[in-house]
Amino acid sequence: MLLILLWAQFQTRAQGCSDAGFCTMGAMKPDQPFNKKIELRLRSMEISFYRGTTTLTPIVYVATADLNFSLNQKTSFQVKLPYQAVSGRLANTSGMGDISLCITRSIRKTEKYDINFSIGGKIATNKSNKHSDENDPLPMYYQTSLGSYDFITGISLICKKWLFATGIQHPFNRNSNEFIGNWSDQDEIMYVHKYSWARHLRRGTDVMARIERNFRYSRFNFSLGLLPIYRINHDQITLADGSHVKPAGAIGLAMSGIATAGYSFNVRSGIKLLAGRKITQRDYNPDGLTRHFVSTISYYYRF
């Protein structure tokens, strides 16, 4: 317990890394339970708190309610309800984050491994068009929603020591962000130009893979893993004259290293800690998702 408390203290000072949401949904989630001696309950509630420092000044805080409901013995339904706040040099913003919905189906279960399949999506809660107090359009780092409706699907293989997962996230629309580097306070203009333009951003499609080594004990569990996310086509923004541009560098690989630790109070409840550090990132990031390091502490209850 002392080690967990020390890690939690470390996490409150951590920085951040990121994805557009699908890496914590259904079959793609990190640190999934695997126990053939005790039947796991499909219904659960998890409350998590996240802090991330971006590559510039914004600090992102997210509190999330992650609810799972069993539809039958093999199928569960997940809904994630986040509330996000951002504090930075240009503005302080807050609001409901994008809602995640996912159905997960167990397609094969043996004594040695499980295979799960998920399908779902994300629902935008605003148009990514928040403005500063001076009514200047804010970069995506300060937005509480990506402003798009996304399709998500993935599959995982879990055994006692390993987790392998892959998934895809495809956005269907542009958002309504208006940021193209304009700012009314000219004293801040050099700093403002460090942010990527994101006017009417259409994100590219992401493909992820998760490779995770688990260490499971009676009450404690730990994991170490890699999370590569590859954007297979360019992000696209719209200039003031209406022309569409695909910024160089807004495509390719972003990869993070992930570590988790957990402690079970009993078969129903426990706490989890997660830290992830960015190993490599894309050169241009109009979506504002880039982090150096992410940290999350969560409490779960199964019923």
Image: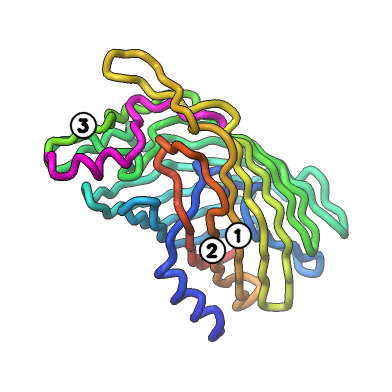
Asked if the magenta segment contains residue 276, the reply would be no
Query: Can residue 101 be seen from the camera position used here?
Result: yes
- Of residues 32 and 141, the one nearer the viewer is 141
Which circle's residue, 3 or 2, is located before the other in the chain? Answer: 3
- Of residues 143 and 198, the one nearer the viewer is 198
| Residue marked by disc 1 | 258
Q: In the image, 81: left or right of 59?
A: right
CB contact under 8 Å: marks 3 and 1: no
- Of residues 63 and 40, the one nearer the viewer is 63
Rounded to the nearest whole Å, what is the CA distance between mark 3 and mark 2?
35 Å
Q: What element carries label 3?
A: loop
**Magenta stretch: helix, strand or loop mostly:** loop
Q: What residue type is labelled 1?
A: Ile
Q: In which quarter of the image is residue 270?
A: bottom right
| Residue marked by disc 3 | 182
Judge depth for marks 3 and 2 and give the one in front.
3
- Of residues 182 and 2, the one nearer the viewer is 182
Q: Which amino acid does label 2 sit on?
A: Ala
Q: In the image, 151: left or right of 84?
A: right
Residue 176, horizontal then vertical, whole percent:
32, 27
Residue at the spot 80% in from the left edge and 52% down from the top edge: 114
Q: In the image, 100: left or right of 181?
A: right
| Residue marked by disc 2 | 275
Residue 302, horizontal then vertical, whole percent:
60, 64
Which circle's residue, 2 or 1, is located before the other in the chain? Answer: 1
Numbered range of the magenta stretch: 185-205
Rounded to the nearest whole Å, what is the CA distance between mark 3 and mark 1?
37 Å
Residue 227, horizontal then vertical, whole percent:
63, 50
